């Protein structure tokens, strides 16, 4: 996970309890989409424009805007910098400064839809064929319980097991067959740690909310939950056998096996640096960690493999997309959908985007959960096969398993919960006498207090 993606997973939920009067309601009438003049001049305000400090990406974005405007002479795109910021969203909404089409993280749509702060675009989708090929489970993130749609996904990711193929070979492990269960992770970690005193078999986080984030991912992998909604009331759900299993395995690996190393209280960059050093065997990560390890920590693309999350009952996933201002007119909604299905949601542009990435010498071929189904998915794979510049065979275990592992999103008020769950992760990794039952019980009480504010 790159630092920017970590921010995408940190602090994303909107503040609960904001008055609904801050926004107009999107249309929820039945029937066809309202008519609009296809030749009417429209100024479409969007965000997501990269800043000047990202000169190459900014130019690419603006080049796409120019080409889009050439193809659609009645639409002027007013692109703004920035993405979703929970700290400013409500004031922009109330002050009429919110863009017509705006960037969101996967943790945002549910709250925005519940507060009726976004426009219902369901009636317009039949006019835009590419939207029919987007994965239904991703479209569901942007839909309400009745199936009405309020936005479109643009990118997504999920977590798997990142590992050092060279260390696997040195430890007598098969680098083409990474551990499929947490029991196999423990066994492999012991073998890697046995290579010498400087080697760490398995690493995990426990600081600055990253511990709670990984605890959540590991709970999901076993089929557990962090929080569940029963009749409209959220309650903590991790103080159970699965929660104890996650912490007990880490405690056993740390203190009984000595396969996790003495250095603990690790946060985001620590495991990437350790992997780049060639001394760490495995850790849970998103595919784009590989690029960051290479670019920032002197790693080598050829050294790393990626497998599915162990046990694979589910995997923590995230991503981003775009939603529509609740006050957007039919003309602006159609213009916005034209823009999204020109660039982000256009299977006919997949190869062009990979070609551009390859020319910039950025990775093509890192496995990400596909946005598409059917023919669009086939186009994406064909483009990867043609333009890949990475050892994609190293990621085959992850790619092969992805479609069969359900995606689960973060819990509500995720970052507050992660801060609480850092503590049990820290304790089992720094105190061999840590009381797992008490740690979970204490965390449950605190998380239930946090969840009491979720509506």
Image: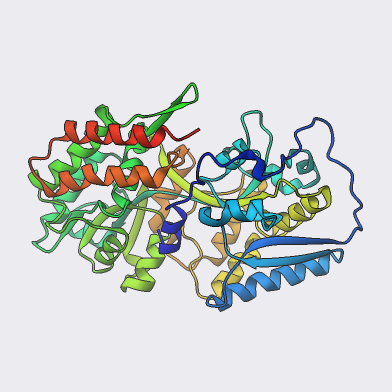
Q: Quadrant of residue 425?
A: top left
**Which residue is nearer to you in this view: 210 or 316?**
210
Task: Choose between 286 and 214: the one closer to the eye.
Answer: 214
- Residue 323 shows in the view: yes
Residue 254, percent from left and from top: 13, 48
Residue shown at 73% from the left, 66% from the top = 78
Residue pushed farthest top? Answer: 231
Rendering colour mode: rainbow
Q: Residue at x 26, y 54 (%)?
A: 207
Quarter of the image where the N terminus is located: bottom left
Quarter of the image where one finds residue 299: bottom left
- Is 300 above or below relative to 271? below
Task: Tell me where residue 394 appears, x and y as whole percent.
Answer: 38, 58
Q: Is residue 309 visible?
A: no
Image coordinates of residue 410 in percent, x first then y, are: 43, 42
Of residues 402 and 391, the one nearer the viewer is: 402
Q: Is residue 274 left or right of residue 45?
A: left
Q: How many marks?
A: 0
Q: Is residue 380 left or right of residue 400?
A: right
Q: In the drawing, does residue 387 fall left or right of residue 204?
A: right
Spot occupied by residue 255 in the image (x, y as percentages of width and height) = 9, 46
């Amino acid at each position: 996970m790159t630092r920017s993606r970590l921010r995408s997973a940190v602090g994303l939920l909107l503040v609960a309890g904001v008055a609904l009067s801050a926004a107009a309601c999107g249309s929820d009438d039945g029937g066809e989409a309202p008519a609009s003049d296809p030749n009417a001049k429209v100024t479409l305000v969007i965000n997501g424009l990269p800043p000047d400090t990202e000169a190459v990406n900014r130019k690419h974005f603006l080049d796409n805007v120019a080409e889009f405007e050439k193809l659609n002479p009645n639409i002027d795109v007013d692109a703004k910098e920035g993405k979703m910021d929970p700290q400013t969203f409500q004031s922009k909404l109330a002050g009429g400064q919110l863009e017509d089409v705006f960037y969101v993280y996967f943790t945002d749509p549910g709250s925005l839809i519940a507060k009726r702060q976004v426009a219902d675009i369901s009636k317009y989708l039949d006019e835009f064929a590419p939207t029919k090929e987007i994965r239904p489970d991703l479209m569901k993130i942007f839909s309400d319980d009745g199936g009405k749609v309020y936005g479109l996904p643009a990118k997504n990711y999920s977590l798997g097991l990142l590992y050092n193929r060279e260390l696997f070979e040195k430890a007598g492990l098969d680098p083409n067959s990474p551990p499929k269960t947490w029991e196999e992770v423990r066994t492999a970690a012991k073998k890697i740690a046995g290579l010498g005193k400087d080697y760490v078999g398995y690493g995990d986080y426990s600081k600055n909310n990253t511990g709670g984030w990984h605890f959540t991912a590991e709970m999901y992998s076993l089929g557990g939950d962090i929080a569940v909604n029963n009749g409209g009331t959220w309650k903590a759900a991790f103080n159970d056998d699965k929660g104890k299993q996650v912490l007990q395995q880490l405690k056993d690996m740390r203190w009984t096996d000595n396969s996790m190393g003495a250095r603990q209280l690790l946060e985001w960059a620590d495991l990437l640096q350790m992997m780049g050093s060639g001394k760490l065997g495995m850790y849970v990560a998103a595919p784009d960690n590989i690029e960051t390890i290479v670019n920032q920590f002197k790693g080598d693309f050829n050294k790393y493999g990626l497998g599915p999350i162990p046990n694979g009952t589910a995997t923590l996933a995230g991503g981003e997309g775009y939603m529509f201002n609740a006050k957007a007119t039919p003309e602006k909604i159609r213009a916005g959908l034209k823009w999204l299905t020109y660039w982000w949601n256009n299977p006919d542009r997949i190869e062009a985007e990979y070609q551009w990435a390859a020319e910039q010498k950025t990775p093509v071929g890192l496995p990400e959960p596909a946005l598409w189904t059917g023919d669009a998915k086939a186009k994406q794979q064909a483009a990867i096969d043609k333009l890949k510049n990475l050892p994609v065979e190293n990621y085959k275990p992850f790619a092969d398993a992805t479609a069969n592992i359900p995606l689960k999103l973060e819990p509500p008020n995720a970052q507050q919960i992660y801060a609480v769950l850092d503590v049990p992760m820290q304790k089992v990794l720094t105190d061999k006498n840590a009381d797992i039952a008490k740690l979970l019980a204490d965390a449950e009480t605190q998380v239930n207090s946090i969840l009491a504010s979720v509506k």
